[in-house]
Amino acid sequence: MATLIGIAFVAGLVTAISPCVLPVLPIIFASSASGSARRPFVVVAGLVVSFTAFTLAATALLSALGLPGDLLRNIAIAVVLVMAIALVFPFVARYVGKPFEAFGRFRFGTGGGGFVLGLSLGLLFAPCAGPIIAAVSLIAATKQFSLEAVAVTLVYALGAGIVLLAIAIAAQRGLSAPRLRARAPQIRQALGVLMVGAAVVLILGLDGRLAANVPDYVQSLQGLEESTAAATAIRELTGSEGSVVEGADQEEAVAAVRQAAAETGAAESAPAEPEAAGGAAGDSASGKRPEDQPPAGGEPAGPEPETTQPESPELALLASLPDYGPAPEFTGLEGWINSGPFTLEGLRGNVVLIDFWTYSCVNCIRTLPHLKRWHDRYADEGLVIVGVHTPEFAFERERDNVEEAVEGFEIAYPVALDPDFGTWRAWGNRYWPAKYFIDRDGNVRFAHFGEGHYEESELVIRALLAAGPSQPSDSLLVSTGLSDLTPSRPQTHETYLGYRRAENHAGDPFQRNQAAAYTLPGTELPEHGWALAGTWTVEDERAVAGENAVLHMRFLAEAAHLVLGPSDETAGPGTVDVTLDGTHITQLTIDEYRLYTLAAGQTYSLHDLELEFSPGTAAYAFTFGEIQPGAG
C-alpha cells in the first residue's frame, strides 16, 4: 500500500503540469491572485476535498438520485461563472455573498468564497487518463469503496494540489508587486474576464480538445505510474487479480517460440497445409463439439516406457515454454453456448485455449477463421477452445445477440458468457482479443494479445498436445493456409462515437444525452477526423440518428466497418446510405446489432466517407482494415 501511495503522489504531481490541467489553470491563477494571503491555500484545499469526494462518490450519488451524470459539472461551471462576474463587477460579489452571511466570518472575496470556488474546481478538474486515475474510476463505477481507495485518491489530489498551490502563490505574489498593487481593481477585473473565458471553454466542451491539441510533454515522466510495481499495487487496490502472465513481453515471447521451434526442428516438422479449395472464407467449423466426445487425455493406459529415442521437436519446444502457474477458474459466468458448463478442473488432461473476445470487435473477428480451423484440426487430439465472450457495448450483454453472432460466424466450440467481467477480472485480462494457452496439467504456458502470430500460436498448441497420449496425427500447420489480415501498415484507429470515448471529433461540441442539431465544419476534415450533421442524440457509448442525420469521416485504410443497430427494434430495420469519395456505393439495411462493412477492397489511401442514416439508427464505433469475406 505504501508503494501505491507514493506512486499516486508522484502521478498527481505529473498531472498538475500536464496538458490536461490547462483548462482550469486560468481559474486557479485568477481566483488565487486576488484576496487575502491565505486565499490560494483555501482554493486548493477546496479542490483537493472536492476531487477526492466526488471522484469516488459522484457516480453512486447521482445514480441513486436518478440525476444526470453531468449535473455536478454544470453546477460547478455555473459557480465559476458567477464568481468570475463578481470579480469583474464588485457589486455582484456583495449580493452573491449575502446568503452566506449567516456563517459569520464568511467573506465572498476571501477564504470562504475561495473554498467554495475550490470545491467547484474539484468537479472540473479532469486529469489525463493514467493507471492511477483509471483504477479510481473502476472503484467508483463498481462501488468498491475502501479506506485504501480514499487514501490513494486523496494523495493523488494532494500531489496535484501542491503544484497548483505553488502556481497560485506565485501568481498572487507576482501581482502584489508595488507597481501592480496600485492597479489592483483593474487587474481584478482582467482576471475576472480570464475566468469568464475559461468558463466559456468549459461550457462549449472545448476543454478536452484544447488539452488534446497540446503536445504530451510529460510522457517521459509517467514511467513510474506504468511500472510493474504500480500495476501490482493497483490490482490489489481494485480487487482485480494480476494478469496470469504478468511481466511477460509478448514480442519476446513470440520471438522465443520462433527461435525454439527453429532450434528444435518443430517448425520444420510442421510444414504448411495447402489451402483448401474455395479458400479460407468458405471453411466451416464442422468438428465435434467437446460435449459430443469424451475429453482427450487422462492417465496413460500403462506406465510410460523408457525410451532412448531423441526427444520430439514438439516436446523440446514445450520444455522451452515458461510456466505461469495454474489457470484461474471460470468465474461469474451467466451461461454457455454450444455446450453445457465447463470447469477448468474438469478439463484437466486436455490442452485448453481461452479466447477473450466480443462479437462486434473487428480485431476479434479477424482471428476467428484461425480459431475455427484449429478447433476442426485438433479437437479430436485433445484441444478444447473456449471463447469467453466479455461485452464491450451494452447490446453485447444480451444472450440472444451473442447466440446469433455465434451462429453467424459458424463457431462450433464452446462460448462462455461473461457479461459482468468475472472471468475477465480473474485472469487480469486487459485486451480484446486475448488468447491463453493451458497445458494438460492446467498451467498457463503462453499468451497472445491482439491479432497475428498465428503460426507461432499453432506451434504452441502442437507442443502442448505432444505431452499427452493423443498427439497431432500429422505435421502440417493449418495457420499458413489462411490469410493473415492483421494490418501491416498505419491506418485509422478504432473510433468510438459515444462521448465517453470519442476521439478525433472535428465538429460541433456534443450536447450530451439530448437530441441536438449539428453542422459540418466549413473546412476539410483532418486525417482520421469525423463530424456530424443533422439531428443526433450523442450518448455515452453511441450516437443515435434523428432527422437528416449525416456523418462524415476521413479515414486511412482499405476498408471501413461500423458497429450499428436499430435503437428501437420494434420500429423495424433502419438504413445507412454509404458514399465513398463522392460515389454512392451501397445502402445497408440495419436490422440487428453487429459490425457492418461499409466499404472493402479499396486502395490503401485517404478516403472521404459520407453516411446518411434513417432516424433511430444507432452507431457505436468504426473499425478499419480488411476482414474475412462475409464476416461483417
Image (tube, grey):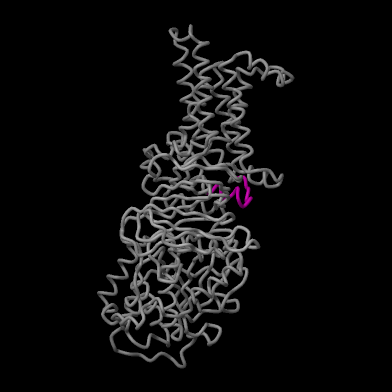
Question: Hey, which residue is sitting farthest right in the picture?
Answer: 102
Rendered view: 45 above or below 622: above
Q: Residue furthest front?
A: 583
Please tell me which residue is depicted at 53% across the width and 48% down the height of the picture: 500
Residue 371 percent coordinates (x, y): 43, 74
Residue 470, picture quadrant? bottom left
Vertically, is 26 above or below 74? Answer: above
Residue 182 placement, left or right of 567: left
Secondary structure, magenta segment, majority class: helix
Q: Residue at x 49, y 61 (%)?
A: 429
Question: Measuring 51% from the left and 66% from the top, which residue is drawn there?
Answer: 359
Left or right: residue 181 compared with residue 279: right
Q: Position of residue 88 (x, y in %)?
A: 56, 16
The residue located at (50%, 46%) in the rendering is: 533
Please provide percent x and percent y for residue 330: 56, 69
Q: How many marks?
A: 0
Quick check: 590 left or right of 69? left
- Residue 137 falls inside the magenta stretch: yes
- 173 or 74: which is nearer to us? 74
Q: Provide residue 185's location: percent of width, then percent of height.
A: 53, 10
Highlighted magenta segment, given as a residue range: 135-147
Q: Is residue 9 above or below residue 397?
A: above
The question of residue 260 being in magenta is answered with no
Of 185 and 494, nearer the camera is 494
